[in-house]
Every structure is written in structure tokens, then in C-alpha cells.
Image (cartoon, helix red, strand yellow):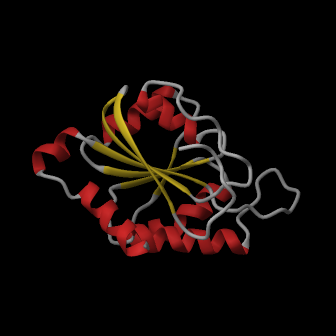
Amino acid sequence: MKKSIIIFVLALTSVSAWAQSQVTTLILVRHAERQEDGSKDPGISSAGEERAAALAQLLGAADIDAIYSTAFKRTRNTVQPLAAKKGLTLMDYNPMSGEDLDNILSKHKGKTVVVCGHSNTTPQVANYFLGEKKYPDFKDSDYDNLLILSVIEKGNATLTWLNYGAPTVAGMEK
């Protein structure tokens, strides 16, 4: 199954040169399981480290051009193994800023970008690029969603919904 997902992701990112110049692929993930240490900025737990490793394994062969993360330990810890594997530096973004989201799209037009957020921002980023409020926030216990957005422009996008790593409880209707 994991091989099928990798092949699917690679197929999405390996389209013709014309299509690549027109379509930007955004791979949206929520941070992995957080450490319950009572702090306002926890890292990820051992289960979260396993999920972060699964993400790096899954996307390691894909042509990733950039990786964005919010400025929290848990989001950075989730995508850092992938960034290390790809030799990329994590870039910060504000998921509540339409300007930041527009900049990600314009800066990486025709490329593939991983964007790591939170239960209450990842679906909203998808909604932003889809141009409609289609998806509610993830449940707090839901960590395994991987959303692939093929974006021509804001409001002209399609979403493919996958799961990765160890399954978590059902989060939302797809």
C-alpha cells in the first residue's frame, strides 16, 4: 500500500513540462502526534517521531522543491526528517495569512511544496486554495491525513486525500 501511495505521489509530481509550469502541487499535512508536556510549544512524541519518519520515507523519492512549517516545534519536528533527506531548509509561514499562502503559490509555481500545519489550519489552507469552505477542522486526535492539492490558481484546484503512517481515529468525512 505504501508503495502505491509513493507511486501515486510521484505520478502527480512527474507530469509533463507544460503541466508543471501550470500546476503547483501542495502536499498538506498536520503536525505529528505532540508530546504532552504541558508546554505551549511541545515537540512531538515517540509516535510523532515514527510518523515524521513515515512522511520522510513516503515523500523521500518525490521531487520536493520547498517545505513550509509554522513556527512551532511540533510542525518543524514533523517535517525536519523530510527536509534533511531532501537537503532543504524549512521555511516559516503563517497559515492565517492569505498573503503568505499566495506567496507560497507564486514563489513555487509549477513545483511541489510540502506545507505542515495544525488541526485547525491544514483544512483551512486547503479551503483557501479550493476557493470554498469545504472541509472542517481535523479532530484533535487525527494525525494521518495527507492532502494533495493540484493548484492552477486560487479557486481552481483539486484535492486528493490520502493517509500515511499509523492510522489514527477517523477525523472527518472526505
Q: Is residue 160 left or right of residue 119?
A: left
Q: Is residue 32 above or below residue 158?
A: below
Q: Which of 84 and 148 is in front in this view?
A: 148
| Image location (x, y in percent) of residue 56 | 47, 70
Q: Position of residue 35 (x, y in %)?
A: 78, 64
> Toward the viewer: 98 or 122?
122
Question: Which of the pair 26/81 is nearer the observer?
Answer: 26
In the rendered structure, the answer to whether residue 91 lies left or right of residue 64 reads right
Residue in front for this viewpoint, 69 or 23: 23
The answer to whether residue 11 is seen in the rendering is: yes
Q: Where is residue 159 in the image (x, y as percent from the top left)?
A: 40, 42
Q: Quadrant of residue 129?
A: top left
Q: Residue at x 85, y 55 (%)?
A: 39
The image quadrant of residue 96 is top right
Which quarter of the rendered picture does the N terminus lie within?
A: bottom left
Q: Which residue is painted at 34% across and 34% down in the image?
A: 157
Residue 4 placement (x, y as % from top left): 36, 70
Residue 163, above or below 81 = above
Q: Quadrant of residue 89?
A: bottom left
Which residue sits at x=12%, y=52%? Answer: 16
Decide if residue 63 is in sight here: no
Residue sitting at x 38%, y 54%:
66
Give the tally of numbered discs.
Answer: 0
The single residue placed furthest to the right in the displayed view is: 38
